[in-house]
Image (cartoon, rainbow, N blue to C red):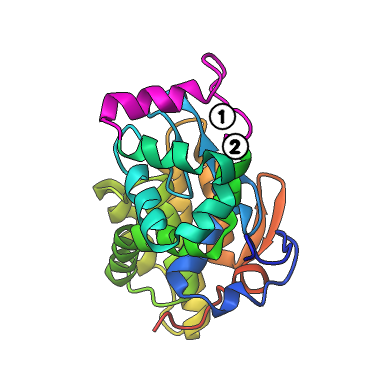
Amino acid sequence: MRLSDPGLDNTSANPYIATKPLAYRCLALTGSFETGKGFPDCFSGLSGDFDGQGISFGVLQWNFGQKSLQRLLREMRDQHPDIMKLVFQSQYDTLLNALDLSQNEIMQFAREIQHPVKHFVYKPWREMLVALGRTPEFQDIETKYAHDTFEKAIRLCREYELGSERAAALMFDIKVQNGSIAGETKRLISADFETIAKSLPQDELEVMKMRIVANRRAGAARPGWTADVRARKLCCANGGGVVHGIEYDLDNQFGISLKSMG
């Protein structure tokens, strides 16, 4: 039983990921932005209790504190027990017992397997969780539990009359990193849209509109985050760019292009 697909990184063409649903591809891209890691490790984002949530894991940082990570782990346990046993080995029963604990007890368990001050998860739990995130089966569960966020991103696309896969990636990254597009920012975007020549070819019009959304949403970010938000959002709009020192090509690496999302 394989725990991951062959070693494909952020600079490699990725034929495997291009076969996956658009929601999965958008999740992988945002996961790479969030973790600074390529596929499949972009699904294995791991944080300790620095924020009081016990352990947070995966692209959307499902966590014990809000009882969201338990749901994913229980579903993986129920649907793929053989893979869970392979990943967690001698700690398999320990994890299963933890998933049946009370909320206070599971938070205590999470804090016992990490540094009390620096909040990094100890070995072997760190390696096991990262290995779990590398499995296609757990990646599919992450995609399932990110579905609501993806659907909200698609609604944003419709609101701004955008229809490409890149637009879906842009709006999904906005939902994950920024939450929303607020009223004043929406007004500025609409005003900017009015200045675009309607005679532009459809692909050029799509890109121009996405760049406006990217720049306006970045301009509304909290001080200190503007450059980071702009880099991520323009990367989606332009189909590539540099984010956190990593060069991205959305079509080659994630199968995300200007074609219609369908």
Q: Position of residue 259 (x, y in %)?
A: 50, 83
Along the line of sight, which residue is nearer the eye, 251 or 108? 108
Rendered-image quadrant of the N terminus: bottom right
Along the line of sight, which residue is nearer the eye, 32 or 184? 32
Which residue is painted at 29% across and 60% down in the image? 148
Quarter-of-image position of residue 23: bottom left
Disc 2: which residue: 126
Disc 1: which residue: 121
Magenta region includes residue 168: no
Q: Is residue 175 left or right of residue 38?
A: left
**Mark 1 Cα within 10 Å, few/some/many (few <14, many 20+)?**
many
Q: Which residues are magenta?
A: 101-125
Which residue is painted at 60% across and 69% down in the image? 254
Tell me which numbered mark, 1 or 2, is placed earlier along the sequence.
1
Q: In the image, is residue 48 above or below residue 71?
A: above
Along the line of sight, which residue is nearer the eye, 207 or 97? 97
**Mark 2 Cα within 10 Å, few/some/many (few <14, many 20+)?**
some
